[in-house]
Image (cartoon, rainbow, N blue to C red):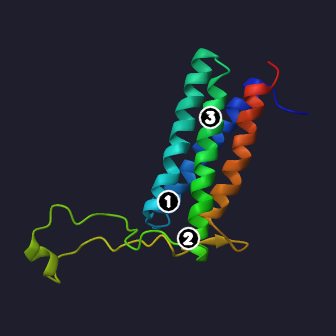
Amino acid sequence: MLPNRFQATLLAGLGSAAMLAGAFGFQYIAGMAPCQLCLWQRWPHAAAVLILVLALATGWRGLAWAGALAALTTAGLGLFHAGVEQGWWEFVSACTQGSIAGLDPAALIDPTVATAAPVRCDQIPWSLFGISMAGWNAIASAGLALVWVRAATGRD
């Protein structure tokens, strides 16, 4: 039995919330700092959670299409990131997390000054069944997009 519109909206929005919770868990509990592409993949999930709140508050069915777009955006970013990790295509060589902003030139050459280590977008810090976190994000987010489409087109 397929979920009704309300159930699909709730499932899709909470799915994005769970994806964000997982990303923050890997970052703050497991100590895996995100790269720039990882950070970019979080924004559409945050937008989907906001869309969930707005959809529940207003009941406007059209918001589900925005949720589907957010899920497809992060799925595309995840697929692109997985391709960078696999070496299928390149991204900027300076894909790092953090910044040296605020450090004076003397601090940049001082070996005693601690700066954030760069996190490379082309490295796979964790995988399951040979699929990286970026790959799993692409797969799960594509599924969430389908649920959002169900929310947009389903019965009440």
Could you tell me how far apart the alpha carbons at marks 2 and 3 are, in whole angstroms? 26 Å
Q: Which mark is residue 84?
A: 2
Image height check: is 34 above or below 109?
above
Image quarter of the N terminus: top right
Q: Give the residue displayed 47% in from the left and 67% down from the top.
A: 32
Could you tell me how far apart the alpha carbons at marks 2 and 1 are, in whole angstroms? 12 Å
Mark 1 = which residue?
38
Q: Is residue 29 left or right of residue 106?
A: right
Could you tell me how far apart the alpha carbons at marks 3 and 1 are, in whole angstroms? 19 Å
Q: Give the residue displayed 37% in from the left and 71% down from the top.
A: 94
Q: Give the residue displayed 64% in from the left and 71% down from the top.
A: 127
Q: Residue 123's spot in the image, x, y percent?
A: 52, 76
Which amino acid type is marked by label 1? Cys
Q: Earlier in the sequence, mark 2 or mark 1?
A: 1
Q: Residue 102's spot in the image, x, y percent?
A: 15, 61
Mark 3 = which residue?
67
Asked whether the viewer can see residue 20, the reply is yes
Which amino acid type is marked by label 3? Gly
Disc 1 crowd, CA 10 A, few/some/many (<14, 14-19, 20+):
many
Q: Quadrant of residue 66?
A: top right
Element type where label 1 sits in the image: helix
Which amino acid type is marked by label 2? Val
Element type where label 2 sits in the image: helix
Q: Earlier in the sequence, mark 3 or mark 1?
A: 1
Image height check: is 45 above or below 10?
below
Q: Quadrant of residue 69?
A: top right
